Image: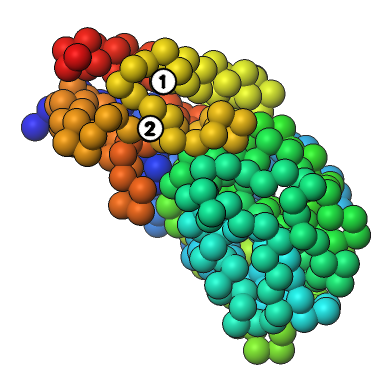
């Protein structure tokens, strides 16, 4: 078996910074002289509480989260938030607006229909989710309890380039696949949530950033672990939290500081995305799938001139050390997920490999 690390373009769980993995490895059996792994610690112990509090404080600092908002670490990933959001928020008016611009926003909308009246404010399904509707195309409800959208569509490779204007209706955003890649004015949002397995940590937890003014109006039948009030009052420790994942998130946040924070990361990710999109725009074989105005900087979707050539490309790329490039089963083709931890070297080498593949298969 090869001991060389590959360039992992998986959409999630995804690549983690090598230095983070090495740091975690050095502490795997004995965390800072405690004689224990973080995996073995009581979540109520002094040493773990320090990890937990430092991680939360670092996240607040890195994302410039205002005092009006609180951070929750909850199990179940982003998918569990598809239920938690309407259970906690829709009760105000019984209605909510949803923007459907990809697979996960569609799933979130379907789940929300169980709990209230849902207005589809916009949909990009007419063009197979290859674009993002403009502000003027949003059909907003003045009496909605909230407006929900997904800022980056992992499967289709599109990304919102603006923050929807919804008046007094709180914004709820699934930022799972582009959080911490671009600065965000958290004060504009009622709720931001993100599964961590793409840009933040190993799978196992969702980060929820919530305006505390919205807490406490959940449906009476809301399970305790889906209640934002319960999680807020218990500081995310109503039960044992995903301790090791939170620890890993803390290491990633410190690595992010070394990259210049989110502002520094934004420059790096823009450069990485340009390497691939320039290659696609110059190519006669490869085509980008998303409209240029909506291209994601995190998930680059593309295809060749045939399904057979797609399959050949994936096979040869895998052999060359570029793995997990196969597109989602819903759309086919290829997808290169170039999250924060993907080094620029990996993106440059993939672009070079694509040029070589094209030259060999004219």
**Do the residues under discs 1 and 2 have CB atoms within 8 angstroms?**
yes
- Left or right: where 203 falls relative to 170: left
Q: Position of residue 239 (x, y in %)?
A: 55, 72
Q: Which residue in the structure is indicated by mark 1?
A: 280
Residue under label 2, please give it: 302
User: Is residue 264 placed above or below 238 in the rendered structure?
Assistant: above
Does residue 270 sit above or below 23 in this rendering? above
x and y, in percent, of residue 62 in the image: 70, 34
Residue drawn at x 54%, y 54% is 126
Instruction: Give the mark count.
Output: 2
The local crowd at label 1, few if under 14, some if 14 to 19, many if 20 or more residues have their Cα within 10 Å, is many
* Quarter of the view holding residue 82: bottom right
User: Label for residue 231?
Assistant: none
Residue under the image location 62 percent in, 31 percent down: 293
Residue furthest left as drawn? 1
Instruction: Please state if 133 lies on the left or on the right of 333 as rendered.
Output: right
Q: Position of residue 172 (x, y in %)?
A: 72, 58
Q: Nearer the viewer, residue 314 or 342?
A: 314
Lateral position of residue 142 relative to residue 114, left or right: right
């Amino acid at each position: 078996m090869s001991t060389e690390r590959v360039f992992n373009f998986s959409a999630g769980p995804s690549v983690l910074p090598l230095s983070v993995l090495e740091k975690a490895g050095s502490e795997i059996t004995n965390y800072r002289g405690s004689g224990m792994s973080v995996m073995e610690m009581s979540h109520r112990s002094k040493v773990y509480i320090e990890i937990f509090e430092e991680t939360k404080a670092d996240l607040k600092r890195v994302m410039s989260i205002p005092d009006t908002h609180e951070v929750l670490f909850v199990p179940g990933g982003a998918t569990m938030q598809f239920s938690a959001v309407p259970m906690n928020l829709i009760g105000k008016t019984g209605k909510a607006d949803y923007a459907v611009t990809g697979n996960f926003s569609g799933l979130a909308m379907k789940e929300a229909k169980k709990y209230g009246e849902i207005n589809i404010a916009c949909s990009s399904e007419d063009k197979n989710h290859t674009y993002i509707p403009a502000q003027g195309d949003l059909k907003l409800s003045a009496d909605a309890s909230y407006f929900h959208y997904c800022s980056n569509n992992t499967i289709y490779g599109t990304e919102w380039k603006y923050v929807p204007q919804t008046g007094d209706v709180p914004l709820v955003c699934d930022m799972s696949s582009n959080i911490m890649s671009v600065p965000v004015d958290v004060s504009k949002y009622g709720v931001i949530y993100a599964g961590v397995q793409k840009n933040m940590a190993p799978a196992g937890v969702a980060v929820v950033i919530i305006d505390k003014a919205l807490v406490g109006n959940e449906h009476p039948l809301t399970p305790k672990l889906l209640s934002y009030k319960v999680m807020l009052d218990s500081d995310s420790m109503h039960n044992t939290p995903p301790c090791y994942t939170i620890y890993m998130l803390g290491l990633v946040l410190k690595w992010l500081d070394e990259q210049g924070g989110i502002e520094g990361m934004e420059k790096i990710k823009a450069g990485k995305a340009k390497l691939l999109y320039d290659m696609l725009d110059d190519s006669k074989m490869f085509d980008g799938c998303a409209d240029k105005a909506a291209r994601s900087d995190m998930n680059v979707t593309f295809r060749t001139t045939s399904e057979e050539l797609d399959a050949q490309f994936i096979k040869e790329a895998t052999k060359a050390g570029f793995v997990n490039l196969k597109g989602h089963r819903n759309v086919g083709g290829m997808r290169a997920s170039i999250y924060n931890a993907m080094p620029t070297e990996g993106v440059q080498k993939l672009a070079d490999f694509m040029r070589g593949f094209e030259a060999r298969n004219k």
